[in-house]
Image (cartoon, rainbow, N blue to C red):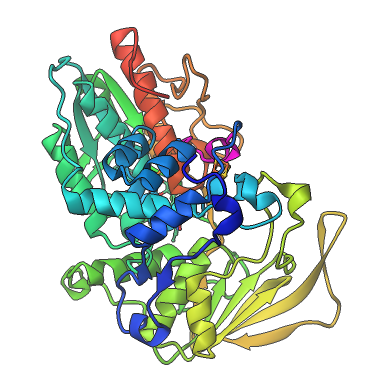
Amino acid sequence: MGKITGFMELERIEEGYKGVPERLKNYKEFVIGLDANQAKDQSARCMDCGTPFCNNGCPVNNIIPDFNELVYQGDWKNAIDVLHSTNNFPEFTGRICPAPCEAACTLNVNGDAVGIKSIEHAIIDRAWAEGWVTAQPPKTKTGKKVAVVGSGPAGMAAAQQLARVGHNVTLFEKNDRIGGLLRYGIPDFKMEKSHIDRRAQQLEAEGVTIRTSVMVGELPQGSKVTNWAVKTVTPAQLQKDFDAVLLTGGSEQSRDLPAPGRDLAGIHFAMEFLPQQNKLNAGDKLKDQKIEQIRADGKHVVVIGGGDTGSDCVGTSTRHGALGVVQFEVMPLPPEQEDKPLVWPYWPLKLRTSSSHDESTEKGILKREFAISTKEFVGEKGQVTGVKTVRVEWKGGKMVEVAGSEEIIKADLVLLAMGFVNPVATVLDGFGVEKDARGNAKASTEAVGGYLTNTPKVFAAGDIRRGQSLVVWAIREGRQAARAVDAFLMGVSDLPR
Ligand SMILES: Cc1cc2nc3c(=O)[nH]c(=O)nc-3n(C[C@H](O)[C@H](O)[C@H](O)COP(=O)(O)OP(=O)(O)OC[C@H]3O[C@@H](n4cnc5c(N)ncnc54)[C@H](O)[C@@H]3O)c2cc1C
Ligand code: SF4
């Protein structure tokens, strides 16, 4: 514990943000991280609890009190080693993790949690700047070949772990760049893509072969899942060519809203809208790919879905220059402040206002509607012009419509951001992988035999196994699955769980 009385003397401070007018000019990151002195003060607030709930609340079990202490002592080099011992990519989580560790922090019981995420962010950015993040190629090779299918955070973490213990890893990705939803879901303003590119270089230097634009199996006919694959490899071929296959293809099937009028022009899945902007930011020309960009400028936008994806649609629409954005959430307005003694150390249900919400509120274009449901899309000449809604109440866990509360909300563009139902079934079917009741790959997370599906030598991890989740969970599952694959190939594994 760095400073015994730190938690009593020092206040939590938040990372800074560039001003709204400046950040709306582009899609770049706008968070201003802590400087070294601020990070030292923030880490001094840590009480080094005998039972560090933060460590348990963190899905990758980051050893938080230890890196806090090291930052306080100014030993940043050891701090990044501690951080990397549990998390392959702290620059991803330090930017976009909702930080369940902070909800679990003991200081959060009746005050402000240690700013764990901002300290993590400061450590990894410093480590890159100092040149401390280097490739760790294995000293010896095992001669075993592993195919990892899907290059999101789960696939990247697994590939890295497996390559570092000497396996020949090939990472297959149907899109033209690696990163999964980090690349083509999460907007650049939350996380710039150079962070993924640096890790791709590191993976290659550690011996991972990256094969982009290669689809393993087939997508269903007419699928709206992003796919820039130019080549297809069959599941049978992979099973023949590799000693083990790890499926990390994510949960890509967007939840649809099959209300009357759904086929009108101007209604799109969020995952049709968001990847296009990320591609343009990367310098691609959509026209070359014969794609007309879905634009929000000058439009009244309705975003259906109150979660992260919906918020990203709000932020992107605001940057496009939308005239107005209305975001729907079917659940009632949650409390602004949770009942801490009741919910700590768990993730609380409370109103979450993102930086995208703040921006569009400052511009005066956002309205957030709660307890509202969509009855119908209305339109003229085949183009959506509005959404017919009804107010709802929740009684005994059931949704009940409020009689006479129907109204039509103007909309030139509707973005469906209601989450993802399951992985694209054809990929799992291609490998003969059994699914659970939700359509995800069926595999346990047991220490022995975990992540293995019913198909011999085929494993599954990340959103494809657990359903739509978080980057930090994908990293955890990728790491644990890598250990399971390594133990399967070698009989034992030294990789951490
Ligand atoms: C818009 C949006 C915003 C989000 N924001 C956040 C956030 O702020 N914080 C957070 O923690 N989480 C966020 N999430 C969730 C998070 O991104 C995911 O939980 C996480 O990326 C899942 O990782 P994954 O590796 O399991 O799968 P994914 O990231 O989905 O990666 C799967 C990859 O597999 C590829 N693939 C699939 N099938 C095949 C195949 N057959 N052949 C070859 N390649 C294939 C896909 O193209 C994709 O690149 C967000 C999600 C979305 C959609
Ligand atoms: S729970 Fe909070 S105060 Fe306690 S060790 Fe973790 S970060 Fe420090």
The residue sitting at 67% across, 77% down in the picture is 369
Nearer to the camera, 192 or 180: 192
The residue sitting at 70% across, 46% down in the picture is 344
**Picture coordinates of residue 490, whole percent (x, y):** 29, 10
386 in relation to 146, above or below: below
206 in relation to 454, above or below: below
Nearer to the camera, 194 or 313: 194
Image side of residue 422 versus residue 320, left or right: right
Range shown magenta: 52-61
The verdict on residue 183 being magenta is no
159 in relation to 342, above or below: above
Q: Quarter containing ligand 2?
A: top right
**Picture coordinates of residue 117, whole percent (x, y):** 45, 53
**Picture coordinates of residue 437, whole percent (x, y):** 61, 35
Outermost residue toward the top? 491
Residue 139 seen in the current view:
yes
Q: Name the image quarter holding residue 37.
A: bottom left
The residue sitting at 46% across, 72% down in the picture is 313
The verdict on residue 60 being magenta is yes
Image side of residue 346 versus residue 385, left or right: right
**Picture coordinates of residue 73, whole percent (x, y):** 36, 44
Q: Name the image quarter holding residue 167.
A: top left
309 in relation to 303, above or below: above
Residue 177 seen in the current view:
no
Image side of residue 474 versus residue 104, left or right: left
